Amino acid sequence: MSADWRTEITKERYTMKIGLIGLGIMGKPMAKNLLKKGYTDLLVNDRAQANMDEIAAVGAKAANQAEIGESCDVVLTMLPNSPQVKEVMLGEDGVAAHMRPGTVFIDMSSINPVASKEIAAVLEAKDIDMLDAPVSGGEPKAVDGTLSFMVGGKQEVFDKYKDILAAMGASVVRCGDVGAGNTTKLANQIIVACNIQAVAEALTLAQKAGVNPQLVFEAIRGGLAGSTVMNAKAPMMIAGNDKPGFKVNLHIKDLNNALDCAHSVGAPVPMTAGVQEILQWVHNHEGGQKDHSAIAQYYECLTNMKIGR
């Protein structure tokens, strides 16, 4: 091997042709970060032409799904749920039908790990490797490129394509074989949802007891109760800001997948079921498109007061 082998590997990485399907709240900034980090041979696809035009304007190429399958070495998806990923990849004239043997599919969507394994099995028969690589961090971390990736798949595939994910995230961890990434994401979403509920409940208690929720937040954020979730969501609750970084409906989807997975493996998840019911209440009261911190509005309805206001 020549002394310049590291340079050659780097060149190979950056000359990979990458396709990204799904340019929503998360996918759009993730595509921009790929371009910023040197992955300029990027084809993008989305149901909304405006989203494709926006990413094409900063250096990507808009393409249809068949073109992505035919020409790309790596296909990435960032889609809402299992049915959409299956349809895009395995549906009639889906992307997989156009992919070459030896290419790779990386699904960054948050879906049921059972579905990840089903998709991987179909692709394996076509000699196409797969990683399931869901993310945590929401829109702010998608924008600044500091997402956390939880990855499932073969070690050698992970090692080869880790740098692509690292272009969009600050943490990229292999958790096991295919399906392990989404199982880890479900665990993450349980913790996040229960944490958000706890923050809303605690700030409600403070306000009802006549203590300023902002001061409570400032007092406890540096202690054991402090968390990334609290730092991100408590100020939103106090300000009444429910602009979505991560929508209620998407968290409901994730917790539905968590409950389905838990039921299939016999894991007790009573806290998950409880917070899911509250998020469903928010959805039923026209809150499905709001940020998941809008869970505070459930408590505001019960108490007839607004946190911090």
Image (cartoon, rainbow, N blue to C red):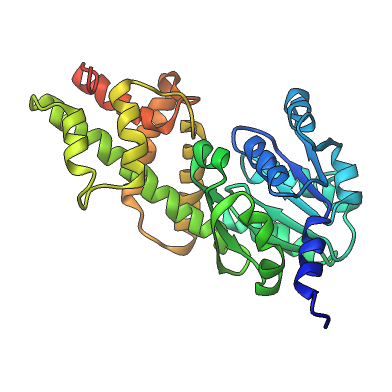
Horizontal and vertical percent position of residue 106: 70, 55
Residue visible at 66% across and 67% down in the picture? 158
Horizontal and vertical percent position of residue 130: 72, 61
- The C terminus lies in quadrant: top left
118 w.r.t. 41: above or below: below
Q: Residue furthest bottom?
A: 1
186 vs 39, nearest the viewer: 39
Q: Residue furthest front?
A: 3
91 left or right, relative to 109: right
Image mark count: 0
Horizontal and vertical percent position of residue 255: 46, 45
Residue visible at 83% across and 83% down in the picture? 1
38 w.r.t. 180: above or below: above
Horizontal and vertical percent position of residue 19: 79, 46
Picture quadrant where residue 234 is located: top left
Residue visible at 69% across and 35% down in the picture? 23
Residue 91 visible here: yes
Picture quadrant where residue 203 is located: top left
Residue visible at 36% across and 46% down in the picture? 228
Residue 115 visible here: no
235 left or right, relative to 62: left
159 vs 178, nearest the viewer: 159
